[in-house]
Image: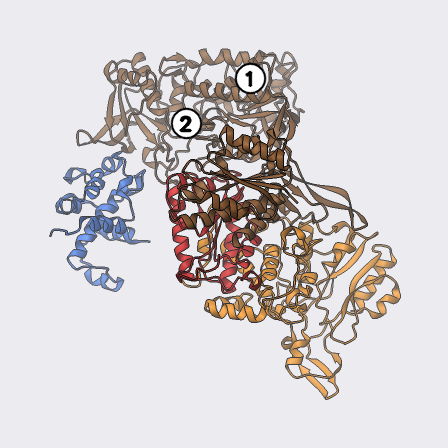
């Protein structure tokens, strides 16, 4: 039998004004298990806590019921107080007689009656409480970063610089991500590769960073501090140790000229050979063979690259390899892509090669791009004279089938950038930007946009374009409205650039499922708290970096990458993690081994083992559920799925809840 | 004609059209797409504001309300699902109801067909009332 | 039947299995009972006819733990239960040799009794082959009944003639479905709440908590039932209220929801004749309507509807009052 | 609580299961915003709506509760990511079954209520109390022994 002390708080007049505190004390004094009951002005104060500690010592209390404010407010306080007096902190229950009683009821008699009932429920529960102990789990001092774009690179560098080992897994043959495709960056117009390439090289050379390019995360198990990840290293068909990156193979690949394999990196604006590096500064500078297109893999003939390779690095026999590595923390930096434009037939993207996306424009303006940086129309290779930019293509759409409900955030700025860069090179180009709103919050951002208007005379028109019609003469007819001037506009253009909405990398859904990290309706990863924990996933040990969490520009991405790194470092700096003691427990004698609980566990905390049990003198090997206490977060989903009642939750056990029900219904 | 209760008119328009004028963000894609632009005194992107303000009389007395061809360009392209074409159509229906008109039975249609009725009108009527 | 006996003997003789589970003759011609068969002479009592309604799949939970393989005779509908047990890791498939036995519908002696047939001495026409009438030799003379009229209710909503899992099949089966599975449920749904309450109260008040339904149910295979478990304070207790067993039956049905194959054993064995399958079938119907058609045991890989969800599932408030619309 | 004999007004007994992360916090917010609801509602804190075993609900009715309401995070917002989805299915089936055996609709309810929805919590509880009052005492699911 427990020896329970009940402490009723006045909370000044917050409780005492509506609840007859003295009466509550008198009425609960004779409840089963109660050996002591008292009230005090402020139970949470120093003096109040002192009173509790004294009572614990004097009456040898084994359980406490505090009738006070919400347990969300002071449960921790009172648990710490119990611990100070040598009582297990989980022997404390709080009856919420403020938020859920005194503050919402006016009639004193009624409120007092309810307070007594709430106290009784808490007393009944404490009678069944058992001392619980927080567990400890070790921390593997290594981090995984999924995605090798600027977000992943920055996070990895920051973690590595703090002295912890980091692995980057990148799906593409090279790190660099979207940023490596860009020409210049706003608002300072530095060349993207000039600022990115050094970082890529640094990643490659950093003693604490291991790169897995052309690799994918295949399986994730474990939990915060103790993840185990299977990484599939796809067969490159080139031995990275032998390859010198000379590029002979790519140059000689017969498919380079005749293969018609669109280059992913150049967004299909030019072709690439079957053995290729995505771009010249690729890291690592090791080509891969695209086995789907390679003649050797398709027919068994050719083999030119293997013959030509001076260091004999080409290896057609190479197989995918799975490596299993342990990590303490995982950062998701899977980045973004732009949406598919098939649904926007009115903009003629699929009809005319001269209607391009902004990211294609980046490639066309890049000195290393398909046109050597010379802006030209893809149809006739002429330099465009009149260029129209259309903003918000697929952004800010209400219906899911049309596009995305959010603002893609970066388009206003990069469009101003594009307009200015074009004007810089070819001043007699006419540029018109059709916008809904120009959104330029950010340091030096609005100044940047105004420069496009004031210095470069870019024509900004408020009004969305209705239709783009390719004309027989090869030009494009743009029909739009100038809402401010009240005019409908039909103008000819040589090139139309669409600011397509961005969306999270489509692979993120798969990855989020593996990590049990939650994602929102738009497939962006969810933060643990939108304001206070913006770089953490609700799933412990998973952190967010870059566009995977939401639209953002490069400076923001880099700051978030740093923030995620700090969170990771904070985790890896610990030797042990405390685990929540309110976990599920399986009674092996009752367990059927039916796997129902494992099917509903969101954390993969339940596994099945064959164990020897002694059931009323019968020794048997049974398949029973085992709860990994470090993984279990104590949600209790398993307990209500379990038909036999074998699964129970510590701190909220079946009996504790039913006894509360009984006490309330008494 | 003078509506006594503007609010209920607005609600009725919302109900008939099934679209929410408050969703409009004035992007102007409807106005940009409108083939009858030159004929319209109130432009499609303004329809939502007229309804929000309760200026229904004015909308109905405008040329625009009856110059809309119901070509559905604005309905197809509206990124916010406001679909100005539906709004103006609802306003027209509302007026028709005020005059005592109501739903038509399919049997009544053949009689009403005139020789020189433009086919587009028929097609657009079907598109409009398909559900 | 002889073919089946021969084959079972052969399987034991050649060492494929150590024992077989089938039915042996009961004290009356219409109540054969499940039994183990090991030695050739055991088979003298073996019987497989229209009255062998018992679903033997549940017996395999224990039998599969024994040394050596066990052959089990399963009718087409029983194989669903067996599949479900596999899904729940309750039986060892490796240790089981499934003989899919033919079935042309199982018989309900109560139907004969209701038709006024008494004093039965022997019965013919219930063999697994053949399609004639059932002939009762009674102390009052010979009585005849059409096979179909004597069939258990559950056979009128037969799941089909195919075994969903087996090692071999002996005998022909017939799909005997000629009624709507949810007809009775719909009938009850259409009653007023008062009528429904009165109906279930009068039915469940008959319950004597003999636990026959629980013991026979292949889904109700917990080592220890929650109703015998002290952890819920839900242990068996003396009756005060005649309707008190509602909690037991609702929870029992809830625990097997999404796992119940609708084998109908609960209703067949209930000594009070309570139509217990009406609870299970209500859940099945709701699951089908709310979450899409689901047949437990059909696909051992399929996720049970209660351990699954979609983002836009029906809200509980829309799950009720559907009949009012 | 037994009926108050003096003024014959029926005061129902309502048990509310609230998940710790959203609804319990929503109830706290209702409290700190002084948004009242009847004292007939007694809240039991559970970690997640997915923790609510149908047996708890039947138990409450057996012991004399007149209404049971389960509050959880909005679908998609579950602190444990999926608990409320399972709860939603479980409760849909249970409620449908209770209706089937002739228990009045409306004695049970599920409401999704976030930590920010103090006003919704209070409104829901007021509505639910009114509903239960209109339904009257729970006789169909009660257990005789639990009555006085």
Residue D129, above or below C129: above
Please tell me whether residue A597 is drawn above or below residue A529 in the rendered image: below
Residue A507 visible here: no
Label 1: few (<14), some or many (≥20) within 10 Å? Answer: many
Q: Looking at the picture, how far across and down is residue B77, in whole percent?
A: 30, 39
Report which quarter residue A386 is drawn in: top left
Q: Which residue is mark 1?
A: A159
Q: Is residue C4 left or right of residue D70?
A: right
Query: Which residue is painted at 19% across and 40% down in the image?
Result: B36
Q: Quadrant of residue A1?
A: top right
Q: Colour of chain A?
A: brown
Decide: is D88 above or below A177: below
**Label 2, on which residue?**
A551
Image colour assigned to chain D? red
Tell me which chain the residue with mark 1 is part of. A
Left or right of A496? Residue D49 is: right
Visual hue assigned to chain B: blue
2 or 1: mark nearer the eye:
1
Mark 2 surroundings within 10 Å by alpha-carbon count, few (fewer than 14), some (14 through 19), many (20 or more): many
The residue at the point 47 percent across, 69 percent down is: C194
Estimate the x, y position of residue C189 in percent, counting from the top left. Answer: 49, 66
Shade representing chain C? orange
Q: Chain of mark 2?
A: A
Q: Which residue is depicted at the point 66% across and 42% down?
A: A585
């Amino acid at each position: 039998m427990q020896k329970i002390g009940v402490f009723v708080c006045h909370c000044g007049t917050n409780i005492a004004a509506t609840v007859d505190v003295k009466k509550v004390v008198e009425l609960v004094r004779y409840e089963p298990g109660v050996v002591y009951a008292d009230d005090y002005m402020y139970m949470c104060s120093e003096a109040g806590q002192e009173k509790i500690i004294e009572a614990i010592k004097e009456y040898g209390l084994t359980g406490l019921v505090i009738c006070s404010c919400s347990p969300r407010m002071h449960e921790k306080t009172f648990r710490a107080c119990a611990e100070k007096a040598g009582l297990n902190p989980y022997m404390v229950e709080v009856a919420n007689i403020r938020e859920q009683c005194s503050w919402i009821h006016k009639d004193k008699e009624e409120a007092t009656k309810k307070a007594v009932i709430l106290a009784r429920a808490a007393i009944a529960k404490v009678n069944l409480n058992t001392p619980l102990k927080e567990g400890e789990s070790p921390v593997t001092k290594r981090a995984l970063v999924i995605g090798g774009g600027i977000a992943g690179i920055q996070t990895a560098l920051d973690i590595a610089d703090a002295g912890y080992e980091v692995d980057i897994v990148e799906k593409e043959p090279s790190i660099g991500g979207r940023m490596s495709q860009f020409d210049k960056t706003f608002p300072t117009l530095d060349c993207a590769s000039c600022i990115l390439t050094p970082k890529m090289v640094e990643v490659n050379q950093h003693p604490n960073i291991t790169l897995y390019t052309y690799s994918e995360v295949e399986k994730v198990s474990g939990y915060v501090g103790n993840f185990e990840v299977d990484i599939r290293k796809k067969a490159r068909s080139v031995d990275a140790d032998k390859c010198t990156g000379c590029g002979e193979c790519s140059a000689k690949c017969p498919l380079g000229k005749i293969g018609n394999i669109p280059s992913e990196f150049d967004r299909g604006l030019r072709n690439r050979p079957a053995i290729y590096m995505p771009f010249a500064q690729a890291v690592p500078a090791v080509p891969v063979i695209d086995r789907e297109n390679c003649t050797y893999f398709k027919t068994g003939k050719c083999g030119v690259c293997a013959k030509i390779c001076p260091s004999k690095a080409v290896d057609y026999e190479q197989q995918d390899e799975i490596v299993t590595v342990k990590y303490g923390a995982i950062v998701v930096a899977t980045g973004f892509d732009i949406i598919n434009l098939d649904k926007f037939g009115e903009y003629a993207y699929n009809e005319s090669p001269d209607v391009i996306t902004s990211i294609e424009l980046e490639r066309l303006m890049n000195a290393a791009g398909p046109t050597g940086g010379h802006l030209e129309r893809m149809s006739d290779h002429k330099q465009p004279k009149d260029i129209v930019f259309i903003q918000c293509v697929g952004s800010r759409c209400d219906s899911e089938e049309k596009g995305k409900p959010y603002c893609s955030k970066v388009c206003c700025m990069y469009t101003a950038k594009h307009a200015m860069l074009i004007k810089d090179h070819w001043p007699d180009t006419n540029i018109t930007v059709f916008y809904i709103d120009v959104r330029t919050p950010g340091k030096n951002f609005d100044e940047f946009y105004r420069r496009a208007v004031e210095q470069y005379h870019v024509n900004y028109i408020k009004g969305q374009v209705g239709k783009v019609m390719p004309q027989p003469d090869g030009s494009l007819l743009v029909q739009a409205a100038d809402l401010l001037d009240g005019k409908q506009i039909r103008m000819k253009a040589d090139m139309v650039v669409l600011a397509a909405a961005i969306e999270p990398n489509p692979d993120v859904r798969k990855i989020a499922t593996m990590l049990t990290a939650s994602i929102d309706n738009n497939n962006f990863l969810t933060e643990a708290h939108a304001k206070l924990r913006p770089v953490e996933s609700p799933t412990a040990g998973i952190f967010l970096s870059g566009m995977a969490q939401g639209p953002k520009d490069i400076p923001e991405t880099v700051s978030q990458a740093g923030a995620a790194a700090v969170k990771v470092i904070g985790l890896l700096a610990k030797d042990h993690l405390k685990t929540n003691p309110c976990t599920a427990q399986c009674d092996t004698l009752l367990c059927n081994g039916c796997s129902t609980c494992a099917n509903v566990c969101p954390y993969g905390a339940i596994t099945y083992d064959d164990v020897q049990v002694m059931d009323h003198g019968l020794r048997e090997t049974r398949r029973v559920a085992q709860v990994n206490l470090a993984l279990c977060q104590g949600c209790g989903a398993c307990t209500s799925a379990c038909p036999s009642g074998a699964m129970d939750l510590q701190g909220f056990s079946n009996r504790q809840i039913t006894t509360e029900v009984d006490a309330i219904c008494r | 004609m003078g509506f006594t209760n503007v609010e209920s008119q607005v609600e009725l328009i919302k109900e008939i059209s099934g679209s929410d004028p408050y969703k409009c963000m004035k992007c102007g894609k409807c106005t940009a797409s409108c083939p009858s632009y030159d004929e319209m005194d109130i432009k499609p992107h303004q329809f939502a504001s007229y309804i929000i303000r309760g200026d229904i009389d004015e909308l109905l007395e405008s040329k625009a309300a009856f110059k809309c061809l119901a070509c559905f360009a604005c309905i197809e392209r509206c990124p916010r699902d406001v679909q100005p074409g539906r709004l103006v159509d609802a306003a027209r229906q509302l007026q028709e109801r005020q005059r005592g008109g109501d739903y038509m039975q399919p049997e009544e249609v053949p009689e009403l067909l005139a020789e020189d009725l433009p086919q587009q009108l028929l097609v657009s009527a079907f598109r409009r009332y398909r559900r | 039947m002889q073919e089946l006996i021969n084959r079972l003997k052969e399987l034991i003789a050649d060492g494929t299995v150590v024992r077989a589970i089938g039915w042996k003759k009961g004290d009356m011609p219409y109540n054969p009972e499940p039994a183990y068969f090991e030695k050739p002479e055991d088979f003298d009592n073996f019987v497989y006819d229209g009255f062998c309604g018992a679903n033997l799949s549940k017996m395999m939970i224990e039998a599969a733990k024994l040394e050596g393989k066990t052959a089990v005779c399963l009718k087409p509908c029983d194989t669903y239960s067996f599949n479900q047990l596999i899904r729940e890791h309750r039986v060892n498939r490796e240790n089981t040799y499934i003989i899919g036995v033919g079935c042309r519908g199982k018989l309900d002696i109560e139907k004969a009794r209701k038709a006024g047939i008494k004093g039965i001495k022997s019965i013919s026409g219930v063999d697994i082959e053949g399609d004639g009438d059932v002939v009762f030799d009674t102390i009052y003379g010979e009585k005849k009944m059409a096979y179909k009229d004597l069939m258990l209710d559950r056979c009128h909503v037969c799941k089909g003639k195919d075994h969903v899992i087996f090692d071999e099949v002996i005998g022909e089966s017939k799909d005997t479905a000629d009624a709507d599975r949810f007809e009775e449920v719909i009938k009850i749904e259409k009653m007023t709440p008062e009528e429904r309450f009165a109906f279930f109260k009068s039915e469940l008040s008959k319950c004597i908590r003999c636990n026959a339904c629980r013991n026979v149910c292949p889904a109700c295979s917990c080592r220890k039932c929650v109703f015998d478990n002290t952890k819920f304070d839900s242990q068996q207790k003396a009756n005060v209220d005649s309707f008190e067993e509602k909690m037991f039956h609702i929870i029992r049905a809830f625990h097997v929801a999404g796992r119940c194959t609708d084998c109908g054993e609960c209703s067949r064995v209930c000594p009070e004749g309570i139509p217990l399958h009406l609870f299970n079938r209500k859940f099945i119907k709701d699951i089908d309507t709310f979450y899409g058609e689901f047949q437990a045991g059909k696909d051992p890989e399929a996720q049970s509807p209660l351990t699954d969800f979609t983002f836009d599932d029906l809200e509980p408030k829309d799950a009720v009052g559907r009949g009012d619309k | 609580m037994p009926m108050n004999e003096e003024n014959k007004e029926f005061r129902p007994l309502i048990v509310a299961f609230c998940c710790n992360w959203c609804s319990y916090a929503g109830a706290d917010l209702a409290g700190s915003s002084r948004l009242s609801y009847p004292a007939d509602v007694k809240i039991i804190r559970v970690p997640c709506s997915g923790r609510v075993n149908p047996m708890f609900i039947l138990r409450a009715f057996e012991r004399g509760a007149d209404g049971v309401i389960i509050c959880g995070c909005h679908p998609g917002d579950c602190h444990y990511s999926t608990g409320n989805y399972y709860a939603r299915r479980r409760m849909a089936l249970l409620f449908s079954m209770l209706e089937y055996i002739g228990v009045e609709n409306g004695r049970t309810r599920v409401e999704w209520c976030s930590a920010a929805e103090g006003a919704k919590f209070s409104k829901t509880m007021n509505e639910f109390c009114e509903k239960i009052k209109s339904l009257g005492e729970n006789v169909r699911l009660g257990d005789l022994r639990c009555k006085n």
